[in-house]
């Protein structure tokens, strides 16, 4: 028999923040695969798209999802603290990799570390944070969060090369989200 949370997850609407973030996770998995196959200039472009997607996604989670979980979900503070620790480690590695470039001797080993950190983080969110968010929030709240995340995605596409470092992308993402949510 299917658990209640599994049934709820299957019923998630397109405009639900959990469904949206899961799609982001899948896109990131595909971007890692693309990066594995790429070489030369295509490798640089694939890495830049991945870096921008990761930065935008994490900023959206930090600005929208984590505050909601921390403030409204039972045990949310501990869940969020663990996710932020994971995100911080990945951000440091990502920044280092962007500074050194895809031709650096350590790029391949750092990419393996980054992939493990990012995918483990996504799995932890999907296993620990998302089910609680589904169970302990309203559809309206998840729709509002999805709207803010979508606004950031529309304003900052993963192919935009003018935004610079992950920190710059995260700041722009935060600005868009704050404007969307009326926090600016």
Image: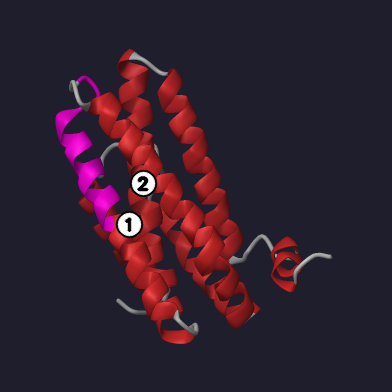
Task: State the SS at label 2.
Answer: helix
Give yes or no for residue 94 being in the magenta stretch: yes
Say how many tags the image has.
2
Residue 20 shows which numbered tag?
A: none
CA gap, disc 2 and disc 1: 7 Å
Magenta region, mostly helix, strand or loop?
helix
- Which numbered disc, 2 or 1, marks the residue that appears first in the sequence? 1
- Residue 41 against residue 141 in the figure, above or below: above
Task: State the SS at label 1.
Answer: helix
Give how far across and how far down residue 62 sits, in percent: 35, 66
Give how far across and how far down residue 128 sits, in percent: 52, 66
Is residue 5 visible in this depiction of the protein? yes
- Residue 86 against residue 67 in the figure, above or below: above
* Residues marked 2 and 1 touching at CB (< 8 Å): yes
The residue lying at 39 percent from left, 47 percent from top is 118
The residue lying at 31 percent from left, 14 percent from top is 40
Give yes or no for residue 27 being in the magenta stretch: no
The residue lying at 74 percent from left, 61 percent from top is 10
Local crowd at mark 1 within 10 Å, few (<14), some, or many (≥20)? some
Part of the protein shown in magenta: 88-103
Residue at the disc numbered 1: 86
Residue 117 shows which numbered tag?
A: 2
Q: In which quarter of the image is residue 87?
A: bottom left
């Amino acid at each position: 028999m299917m658990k209640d949370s599994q049934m709820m997850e299957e019923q998630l609407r397109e405009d639900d923040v959990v469904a949206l973030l899961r799609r982001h996770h899948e896109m990131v998995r595909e971007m890692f695969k693309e990066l594995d196959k790429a070489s030369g200039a295509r490798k640089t472009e694939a890495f830049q798209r991945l870096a921008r997607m990761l930065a935008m996604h994490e900023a959206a989670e930090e600005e929208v999802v984590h505050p909601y979980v921390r403030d409204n979900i039972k045990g949310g503070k501990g869940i969020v603290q663990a996710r932020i620790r994971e995100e911080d480690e990945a951000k440091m590695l990502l920044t280092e990799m962007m500074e050194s470039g895809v031709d650096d001797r350590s790029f391949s080993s750092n990419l393996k570390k980054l992939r493990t950190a990012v995918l483990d983080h996504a799995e932890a969110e999907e296993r620990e944070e998302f089910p609680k968010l589904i169970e302990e929030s309203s559809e309206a709240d998840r729709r509002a969060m999805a709207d803010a995340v979508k606004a950031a995605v529309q304003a900052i596409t993963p192919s935009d090369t003018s935004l610079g470092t992950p920190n710059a992308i995260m700041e722009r993402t935060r600005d868009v989200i704050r404007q969307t949510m009326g926090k600016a």
